[in-house]
Image (cartoon, rainbow, N blue to C red):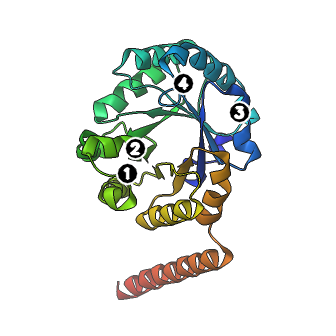
Amino acid sequence: MDIKNKQIHTLKSWLFTPATKADHFGRAAEVGADALIIDLEDAVAPSDKQKARSAALQYLEQPIGNRLPCALRINAPVTRTGIDDLHSLLESSATPDYIILPKCDSSAFVRMVRSLLDQVAKKTEIIALIESASGVEALPDIVKSDVRPAALLFGAADMAADLGAKPSWEGLVWVRSRIAQAAALASLPILDSPYFDLSNVDGLKQETEAAAHLGYHAKCAIHPAQVAEINKILTPGEEEIAKARQILAVNKQGWALSITRWWMRQ
């Protein structure tokens, strides 16, 4: 699989997998996920960070064509653990397709990591994880910077904790909307937070559909069982595709007609 031919906006389902479970990395492909997220942050206990980091980097040393598009979520670079994550990545031959930056609340944050990646000739793209009130406030700065992330990712759990809000759709819909607006201004794709109630399939469906209506192109999963439902909802049906083609055809005809009329007036 050539990542150059698999642009980020086509990746609908992203499966989080703890870096401590290297034997599970291959499951993302088995269940039909479009991308794998190897997690060094929340899913890994402090005592396991070094072991998890080594396992993740070893996996990411594989040629890109032998695996799914893969993102590495590091710990926040403002922490010692996050600095260790970055240093280990920069010193290794591993090249994740994407790196997810937690607690992203400044364009300087993105610029710093981009500069470090460029210094070692890594083509890894950056996904900014927006999961704090300060991150929402910094959105205009982040998306308008000359060094921008490749996408935005909404982090519901930490956002709810930071706001003192309930981690429900109603409690966080305004934040999702702010992120969607900022992403639209910069034509950036946006990934929605995972749905955490594994027993509530209807809730997963409703939240995935609602996020798509806001403009989110993808959703993250925390369990393989969630992937199929996400793919089903976010994959356009034949009727939707036909309508889209019809709209494009009408727009094309309208543009051609406008040009003809303009030319005839000259």
Q: Position of residue 68 (x, y in %)?
A: 69, 39
As shown in the figure, which amino acid type bears the numbered disc 4? Answer: Lys
Q: Are marks 2 and 1 in contact (CB under 8 Å)?
A: yes
Look at the numbered discs 1 and 4 and tell me whether their residues touch, using CB distance below 8 Å: no
Residue wearing tag 2: 157
Using a 10 Å C-alpha cutoff, classify the residue at mark 3 as few (fewer than 14 neighbours), some (14 to 19) or many (20 or more).
Answer: few
Residue 122, label in figure: 4
Q: Earlier in the sequence, mark 4 or mark 2?
A: 4
Tell which tag, 3 or 4, sits nearer the viewer: 3
Which residue, given by chain and number where applicable, does mark 3 sit on?
24
| Structural distance between the alpha carbons of marks 2 and 1 | 6 Å
Q: Earlier in the sequence, mark 3 or mark 4?
A: 3
> Can you identify the residue that label 1 sits on?
167
Q: Amino acid at mark 3?
A: His
> Of label 1 and label 4, which has the lower sequence position?
4
Of all residues shown, which one is farthest toward the front? 199
Q: Nearer the viewer, mark 3 or mark 1?
A: 1
Quadrant of the rendered image containing residue 145: top left
Which residue is drawn at the image coordinates 31% and 42% (left, top)? 161
Q: Residue at x 57, y 44 (%)?
A: 222
Name which of mark 3 and mark 1 comes first in the sequence: 3
Q: Residue at x 36, y 36 (%)?
A: 147
**Type of amino acid under label 2:** Ala
Height in image: 217 above or below 64? below
Q: Residues within 10 Å of mark 1 (few under 14, many from 20)?
A: some
Report how far apart the C-alphas of labels 3 and 1 lie in the structure.
Answer: 28 Å
Label 1 SS:
loop
Quarter occupied by residue 149: top left
The local secondary structure at tag 4 comes to loop
Labels 2 and 1: the sequence-earlier one: 2
